[in-house]
Image (spheres, rainbow, N blue to C red):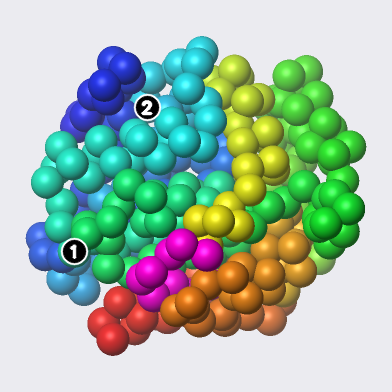
């Protein structure tokens, strides 16, 4: 299996399909590059070199005790881009991965990144505060940490219901999606999964969004129960200089079904502009 090794010795797994202009997909928590399997094929078939990596501590990458923070995640992405010698890069990030690609493009990716697309992304910041009243209370994230620590297998199964919006669309429920969400979650080391809750909830991407100088497509479902749109994309669009926001009615946090079909088409069109 293909790996790159970061300066601190961490092995980052990646998978790729196709040839052409590179597109890198960054996954959400607690998933892995497996979440992008459909996109890897679709974008490769469309003439791109489609690449997805497992964040450190997740999937098949090294299960590190330290380095589970956004700046290290971004440095790992930079190592992947540099070691594969990628230029004119297109970035796609979901949820936590949306924060990862935004920070990379705004900081370490200067001169390499040409466009960014995010879906259900966490920027600018998820945590509720006096300056971010639309955010999610700390108690919610404490509950996620407790679930991961005490019975993560059952917790991931339960979380998948709201992640994919099945609690609102029971007639469209897919047991396969629930099982695969749990499978990918269990591939992540407990330590990394636990630490990453703080990363995706408390990292402030405001300055990254303001510094971003390439076009960004912000996609978000209006039934996203994990990263509510009011504290995320609706704020992010006011902070970027070259942004386009598209809201998908009835779409959940998880990318699946009709939402996935429409989103993939929209990102392909955005990249082709």
Give the magenta range.
210-218
- Which residue occupies 73% across, 19% down? 149
212 is within the stretch colored magenta: yes
- Residue 99 in view here: yes
Give the quarter of the figure containing the C terminus. Answer: bottom left
Question: Mark 1 touching mark 2, by CB under 8 A?
Answer: no
Q: Quadrant of residue 124?
A: bottom right
The picture places residue 106, in percent across and down from the top left corner, at: 40, 56
- Image height of 49 relative to 152, above or below: below
The picture places residue 172, in percent across and down from the top left corner, at: 69, 67
In depth, the one of 259 and 111 nearer the eye is 111
Answer with left or right where residue 183 lies relative to residue 163.
left
> How many numbered circles does the render carry?
2
139 is within the stretch colored magenta: no
Circle on res. 174:
none
Circle on res. 88:
1
Circle 2 residue: 60
């Amino acid at each position: 299996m293909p790996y790159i090794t970061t300066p601190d010795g961490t092995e980052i797994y990646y998978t790729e399909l196709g040839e052409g202009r590179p597109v890198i997909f960054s996954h959400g928590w607690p998933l892995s590059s497996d979440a992008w399997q459909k996109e890897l094929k679709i974008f490769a078939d469309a003439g791109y070199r489609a690449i997805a990596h497992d964040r450190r501590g997740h999937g098949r990458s090294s299960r590190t005790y330290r380095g589970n923070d956004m700046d290290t995640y971004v440095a790992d992405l930079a190592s992947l881009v540099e070691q594969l010698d990628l230029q004119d890069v297109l970035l796609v990030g979901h949820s936590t991965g949306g924060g990862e690609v935004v920070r990379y493009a705004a900081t370490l990716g200067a001169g390499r990144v040409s466009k960014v697309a995010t879906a259900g992304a966490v920027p600018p910041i998820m945590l509720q505060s006096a300056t971010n009243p639309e955010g999610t209370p700390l108690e919610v994230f404490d509950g996620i940490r407790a679930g991961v620590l005490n019975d993560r297998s059952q917790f991931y199964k339960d979380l998948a219901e709201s992640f994919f919006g099945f609690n609102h669309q029971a007639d469209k429920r897919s047991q396969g999606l629930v099982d695969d969400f749990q499978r990918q979650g269990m591939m992540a080391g407990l330590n990394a999964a636990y630490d990453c809750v703080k990363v995706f909830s408390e990292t402030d991407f405001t300055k990254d969004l303001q510094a971003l100088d390439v076009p960004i497509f912000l996609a978000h479902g209006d039934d996203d129960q994990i990263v509510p749109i009011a504290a995320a994309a609706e704020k992010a669009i006011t902070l970027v200089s070259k942004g386009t926001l598209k809201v998908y009615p009835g779409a959940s946090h998880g990318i699946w079904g009709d939402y996935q079909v429409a989103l993939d088409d929209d990102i392909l069109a955005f990249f082709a502009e």
